[in-house]
Image (cartoon, rainbow, N blue to C red):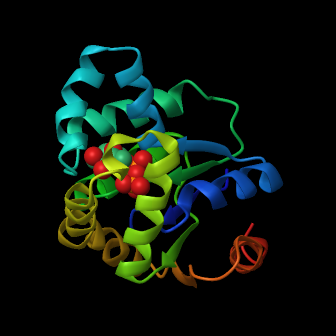
Amino acid sequence: MFNLILFGPPGSGKGTQSENIIAAFGLKHLSTGNLLRSEITQQTPLGLEAKNFMDQGQLVPDAVVIGMVGNFIDANPGATGFLFDGFPRTAAQCVALDALLKEKSSEINIVLALEVAEEELVKRLLGRGATSGRSDDTNETVIRARIQEYHDKTAAVEKYYAQFDKVVSIQGEGTVESIYDDLKKEIDARI
Ligand code: ADP
């Protein structure tokens, strides 16, 4: 298996670039944000629990997210690899993911980290909120809270994988195509 983490703050383009990467490399897309939103739409107990956190721009508890990821991996036994988007977001999630992949005799091969300046992130997210109907993208206070959560908790993820030399930084400002070219080059070099 080839497993990659697409890493970066909210609004850094993970969703957009994930679509390009899974199409080119045949990886299974695992977006915890998308899975959580689908649980909310279906009004499951998990979705109802997660919604309060998401509406405030806070992270959903580790146990909830880790359980959901474990189920997703088990539900895709034939996958040739996964693209993790929006996960892991805390150090505890990194440790849990290593254990889940080890059960499949696999590991994370590369972490691609998209770098985007904060004011550009806020601009992009407000722009997305105006058309997507995502409630956490329409309120600037919630957007700034998500970026703060990213600095407080999620930055630890980059540190975790840096100790294994797995992190490659990619400039996340520019055209979608040029950023994708940079990502593709790094994946081609390792797949
Ligand atoms: P974005 O990265 O643009 O904020 P996501 O769709 O990845 O969007 O996530 C939306 C929200 O879902 C987050 O603000 C958080 O509340 C919750 N969430 C998603 N992934 C995780 C995760 N791995 N751990 C905890 N909470 C998560």
Residue 178's x, y, as percent? 75, 80
Front-lying residue, 147 or 64: 147
- Decide if residue 152 is on the left or right side of residue 111: left
- Decide if residue 177 is on the left or right side of residue 98: right
- Decide if residue 8 is on the left or right side of residue 65: right
Residue 77's x, y, as percent? 63, 29
Residue 120 to residue 22: above or below:
below
- Decide if residue 56 is on the left or right side of residue 13: left
Front-lying residue, 164 or 174: 174
For residue 47, what is the image quadrant? top left
Q: What's the residue at 45%, 33% (across, down)?
A: 35
Whether residue 36 can be seen here? yes
Whether residue 8 can be seen here? no
Residue 83 to residue 42: above or below:
below
Q: What's the residue at 35%, 24% (across, down)?
A: 40
Front-lying residue, 55 or 86: 55
Q: Which residue lies furthest to the front in this view?
A: 130
Residue 2 to residue 162: above or below:
above
Numbered marks: total = 0
For residue 187, what is the image quadrant? bottom right
Residue 37's x, y, as percent? 41, 32
Residue 46's x, y, as percent? 27, 22
Q: Residue furthest right?
A: 24
Q: Where's the C terminus, which quadrant?
A: bottom right
Residue 25 to residue 60: above or below:
below
Q: What's the residue at 32%, 39% (across, down)?
A: 66
Q: What's the residue at 22%, 51% (across, down)?
A: 57
